[in-house]
Amino acid sequence: MASTSGPGPSSGPDPGSVLCDKCKNSVLEPSQNTENVAYGDRLRQFMKEWQLSPQLWPVGYIVGSPYSPFRVEQELPKRDWRNAFEDLLALESGVEMISYESRKQEKAVAAKLSWERANHCIEKINKLNTRDAHVFSLAQTTLSNAKSPEYQTDSSIISWLDQTVNEMREMMQLRVAVAMTFKAMEETRRDWSASRHKDRGQWMASLITGGALRGWESTLEDTEHGAFIRLGKDLEASEDSGGFGCTERELSEHFEEGKPLGVGSPGPPLYKVSDQPPAEPVDDRQSVIGSSSPQLPPDRPTLWTKVPERPYFLGQTTAAERITLPNGKMATRVVMKNYLTNGDVEEKVMVQEPGKVLQEVEKARGLIHDRMLGFDKPIEPF
């Protein structure tokens, strides 16, 4: 669920400086009139106003404003509104806009990673169907024999076999449909910029590593609801206490289906984390708190046959700062930390390497994606 931190000292644009084109009222000025308003409506109103408050600029604006690049790109998809917005933020922060050559290089990396991810998923799906084909054939033969008069099979057994065959057929057809969706998505994304390749929360976090969102930090967590993105002010660099967090799924539903963002937290972590690294390897199953499998409605077959217990990845934090290189030029230094379920912390430092930063982020997100679909374990035969 989406979450926000409490209000802090004001920063960002003046509340009265951004006016609505229709009503001419400030889009950032909080409304104080809550008389005769239901609790749920007041909560949604508070969320909207808090998102557009100066404390959350510009993250809240990206999420809550009708002029968000996420909104505009839905109406005018042929232009790259994300890059344009990032350039404006860079100018506001007093840093140089990202060069054309840098964007070109990152685009090539993003396209390559996206295609590799799609191929990885398609390969896993094909292996699952190949593995299940023999069992499906055997089930069909068994059903055919059961329906034969010479066997005189009980009708309840025939009904159960018939249902099993139908579910297996639907399962294999669903996998094929998912594989075709991955393929079609890659065809659509062929000419996209690196910014468009990124999920919405991922793109907002990349504003930090690109240098346009100064004084902020990001956290990527693996939760039972998938990738959870948390963006917050670096309290050592800023007196503000603004912050925002939600899952990629919530952001997708918010912009594509109009579903309001909720208020809350990502819930308990999926995995138990050791206080100290173990002296010797332990069985992975000892670290599991509970099932991490998202549940589909009972009348639909699940996409995966076995949900893995856990990957080693727990979460990732990212912070950035501006530094001066020996040649006198300014650059963005990114510090990324990967937190593992055995208590280890991997730290990586990258200077002016957007392609490498993207690779590290995609690697972490790939672990979450595989865990959600059950793709991070070898596919074993029945």
Image: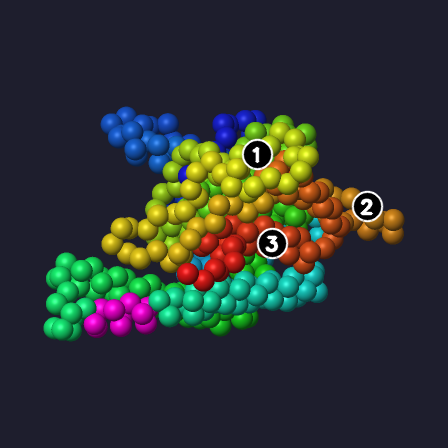
Q: Is residue 320 left or right of residue 286?
A: right
Task: Specify the quadrant that holds the C terminus.
Answer: bottom left
Disc 1 element:
loop
The main secondary structure of the magenta stretch is helix
Residue at horizontal 81 percent and vertical 45 percent from the top? 324
Residue occupied by mark 1: 273
Amino acid residing under circle 1: Val
Disc 3 element:
helix
Mark 3, other Cα within 10 Å: few <14 / some 14–19 / many ≥20: some
126 up-or-down from 249: above or below? below
> Camera-side residue: 344 or 34?
344
360 up-or-down from 317: above or below? below
Residue occupied by mark 3: 363
126 up-or-down from 268: above or below? below
Give the label on residue 318, or none: none
Image position, residue 273 (x, y; %): 57, 34
Give the label on residue 324, or none: 2
Rendering quarter of residue 101 = bottom right
Q: Of marks 1 and 2, which one's residue comes earlier in the chain?
A: 1
> Camera-side residue: 42 or 118?
118
Amino acid residing under circle 2: Thr
What range is drawn magenta here? 136-145
